[in-house]
Image (spheres, grey):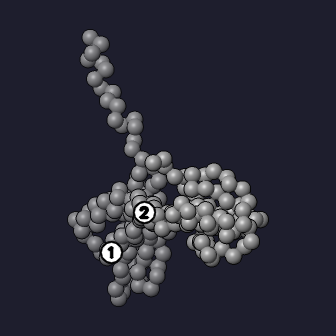
Amino acid sequence: MPEKEVTAISQDQRINEAIRVREVRLVSHDGEQLGILPTHEALRLARERGLDLVEVAAQARPPVCRIMDYSRWKYEQSKRMKEARKRQKVQDVKEVKMRPTIDDHDFEVKAKACDRFLTEGDKVKATIMFRGREMAHLENGQRVLEKLLERVKDLCVVERAPRIEGRNMIMVLSPRPQQSQPAGPKAVPAAPAEPEAK
């Protein structure tokens, strides 16, 4: 059976007896123009073929109707939507929480997690949590965020610079757009060319 062409139909289209205009421009199920016919005649043609009469362009004068299997079209449409949703990459926001007095090893663990999140294509929300008198020394938290940014600067762009929100200092990092594309030049080895020339 030949592949059916995709027809854009609005969500509030009318079918069969719901079409209440006097005449319609009719298109057959295989795309052939059948001309302008009275609605009852177009409906009769659709019923003879065991299909539905679907209004595809209500704003046209006269409205354009197509003979098709409406339930099958709806099913295929929902399958296409499901596939599109499946292929779509949802960008999550992962949070990395730290203190202004974080140790070097703990910082490395958080930086590696941040690295992993960015390479997976997720945004990173880096949060420095202040307690008590630490609020008097905000520059310590600023230094930690700058150190983190220095560590992952090749993978990201700063979406939101560090700023205070209550007792937290927050910075948001987004992955660089070209990270998702495979790098072509790195795959070509350059070193073996010299030994072969001897």
Q: In which quarter of the image is residue 139?
A: bottom left
Q: Residue furthest left?
A: 105
Give the residue type at disc 1.
Lys
| Figure quadrant of residue 48 | bottom right
Mark 2 — residue?
A: 79
Judge whether residue 149 can be spotted in this image: no
What number is the disc on residue 152? Answer: none
- Whole-percent x, y for residue 2 in the image: 48, 47
In front of the other: 140 or 123: 123
Say which of marks 2 and 1 sits in front.
2
Residue type marked 2: Lys
Q: What element carries label 1?
A: strand
Q: Which residue occupies the foreground of this view, 53 or 105?
A: 53
Give the x, y percent position of residue 87. 41, 58
Quadrant in the rendering for residue 196: top left
Which residue is denoted by mark 1 in the rendering? 97
Q: Residue furthest bottom?
A: 132
Q: Quick one: quadrant of the C terminus?
A: top left
In front of the other: 140 or 162: 162
Provide the secondary structure element on which disc 2 rests: helix
Percent x, y for residue 33? 67, 52
Q: How busy is the neighbourhood of tag 1: few (under 14 within 10 Å), some, or many (20 plus)?
A: few
In whole angstroms, how far apart are the C-alphas of marks 2 and 1? 40 Å
